[in-house]
Image: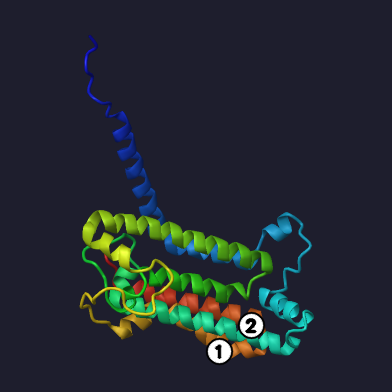
Amino acid sequence: MREAYPPRRQPIRQEKRLSQQRMKISALIFRLRFWIHALIFFLGFTAPWDRWLRLRMDTNGSTWLLISTWIARNGWLTFTTATVVVLVFGIWCALKSAVARTWASAYLGPATVQSWSMHGDTLMAAGPYRYVRNPLYLGIIIHAFALALLMPPSGAIFALATIVAMQLILIAGEEKFLSAKLGELYKEYLRHVPKLFPALRPRVPSSGERPNWLTGIVGEIYFWGVVLSFLTVGWRYNTALITQGVLISLGVSLIVRAFMPRRS
């Protein structure tokens, strides 16, 4: 007669260890997210692979110019009109991203938005979080479309694909963290509120938080600087000037971030 052996616990331990490793990787990516985003956009603007692979591409040409030329060649619009239409699209993307992130930051607070660690003290279900679960990450994706117009074509493709992938990685890690911290309350929130495509109406009752619009605007000053850059110098149709405005906005935001409180 065979002896009854207890079930092996090794697979359970391995799964637990693997889950812990994944959480550590997610936490590290979250901590470095600002610098990872900065690196992605830097590579998008410089597109070094065009030189490494000796691709026959005009590295001085922008995606804005390419799209405008393509529209004109197909006879849909004149080149001048196409250029204006693409510029308006860039302004719309820059403005939409600034509004989305400011709205979210006003409720969540810049200290939490810029924190190096994930936090799950309470469920945020106010402001934009009643319509979409990740308005901050959605804002980054829309913002990438505005900046992509200023990049070389290959850099724009790289930046857009990588930025979207990065946001999905961040969302997966953060939502897993919040599910573990908040339990069934957050899982119920997940079932009702869309991940990235906002609902037309609020999907959950408000959790009662009040916005602080001043800190929200100051915390997202970089995004508003990009909007201002597109609006003020975009009509000169010079991507280099707009890019300079983007860099100035980044510098100002870094100074502001240094003086803003940050959650530990």
Q: Is residue 220 above or below residue 187?
A: below
**Percent x, y of residue 189:** 28, 65
Q: Quadrant of residue 139?
A: bottom left
Mark identifier at residue 57: none
**Percent x, y of residue 204:** 27, 73
Q: CA distance from mark 1 to mark 2?
A: 13 Å
**Mark 2 crowdedness (10 Å alpha carbons): few <14, some 14-19, many ≥20:** some
Badge 1 element:
helix
Q: Please state which amino acid type lies under the numbered disc 2.
A: Val
The residue lying at 62 percent from left, 65 percent from top is: 157
Q: Is residue 178 above or below residue 218?
A: above
Q: Quadrant of the N terminus?
A: top left
**Percent x, y of residue 252:** 45, 78
Q: Quadrant of residue 121?
A: bottom left
Please say whether residue 43 is visible from this viewpoint: no
**Percent x, y of residue 149:** 62, 75
Mark closer to the observer (1, 2): 2
Q: Please state which amino acid type lies under the numbered disc 1.
A: Leu
The residue lying at 72 percent from left, 68 percent from top is: 59
Mark identifier at residue 86: 2
Badge 2 element:
helix
Q: Quadrant of the C terminus?
A: bottom left
Q: Is residue 92 above or below residue 115?
A: below
Q: Is residue 81 left or right of residue 21?
A: right
**Mark 1 crowdedness (10 Å alpha carbons): few <14, some 14-19, many ≥20:** some
Q: Which residue is mark 1?
A: 231
